[in-house]
Image (cartoon, rainbow, N blue to C red):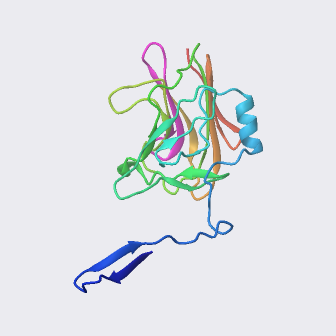
């Protein structure tokens, strides 16, 4: 609240910034993700990364709830103050499409050992852009272990690079439904890669 006051010599206007009482029982005071049963079940599995989208005060650092504490840094598109949105349970990220370059970056997360990895996420697709990303550790020029997201047709897809540098696609046979929440996952047990959506096994592929 800004108060304008005429000065004594009547030549200048003095401005004073005054506080406004806050109704603390009315306004949101905490954006932390609640510790739900889902969160407890995830943490009981001792994951190497877990992001329930619990944000720090500056709005740019996202907390890793696992024991490794590899927090993520937000890359936020121009003219956007935050990428937080209402989620399935607590907070979520609104990534606004591939052209806006909004994402969370984890600089050095623990890599999969013994060719085994599991990745899960809640997603709500508003559209199906080509090669949309849920989670990955490669870009257009440097391939890592996996890319998990959509393929060029908008189907749920995971691409795995094996030890010989060969890349394999494991893909759902229909486009992912839009406008609703889906629990998606893939599991690489060292021999096979299995893709899931809402707890249903979609496909399983052997990778040597």
Residue shown at the point (25%, 86%) measured from the top left: 10
Residue extending farthest to the left is 11
Tell me where residue 151 appears, x and y as whole percent: 47, 41
Q: Is residue 194 visible?
A: no
User: Where is the C terminus found, in terms of image quarters?
Assistant: top right
Q: Which residues are magenta?
A: 148-167
**Residue 21 included in the magenta stretch of the image:** no
User: Where is the N terminus found, in terms of image quarters?
Assistant: bottom left
- The residue closer to the viewer here, 200 or 182, is 182
Quadrant for residue 6, please give it: bottom left
Residue shown at the point (36%, 81%) measured from the top left: 4
Tell me where residue 201 appears, x and y as whole percent: 69, 36
**Residue 157 included in the magenta stretch of the image:** yes
Q: Is residue 50 visible?
A: yes
Residue shown at the point (35%, 82%) measured from the top left: 5
Residue shown at the point (58%, 40%) measured from the top left: 172
């Amino acid at each position: 609240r800004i108060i304008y006051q005429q000065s004594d010599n009547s030549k200048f206007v003095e401005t004073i910034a005054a506080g406004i009482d806050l109704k603390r029982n009315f306004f949101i005071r905490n954006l932390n993700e609640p510790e739900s049963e889902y969160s407890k079940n995830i943490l009981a599995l001792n994951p190497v990364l877990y992001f329930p989208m619990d944000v720090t005060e500056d709005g740019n650092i996202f907390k890793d709830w696992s024991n490794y504490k590899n927090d993520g840094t937000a890359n936020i598109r121009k003219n956007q103050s935050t990428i937080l949105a209402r989620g399935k349970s607590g907070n979520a990220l609104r990534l606004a499409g591939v052209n806006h370059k909004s994402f969370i970056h984890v600089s050095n997360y623990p890599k999969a050992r013994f060719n085994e990895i599991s990745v899960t996420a809640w997603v709500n697709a508003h559209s199906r852009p080509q090669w949309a990303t849920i989670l990955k550790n490669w870009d257009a020029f440097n391939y890592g272990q996996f890319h998990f997201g959509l393929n060029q047709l908008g189907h749920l897809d995971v691409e795995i690079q094996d030890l010989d540098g060969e890349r394999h696609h494991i893909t759902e046979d229909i486009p992912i439904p839009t406008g609703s929440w889906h629990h998606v996952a893939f599991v690489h047990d060292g021999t096979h890669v299995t893709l899931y959506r809402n707890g249903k096994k979609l496909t399983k592929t052997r990778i040597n």
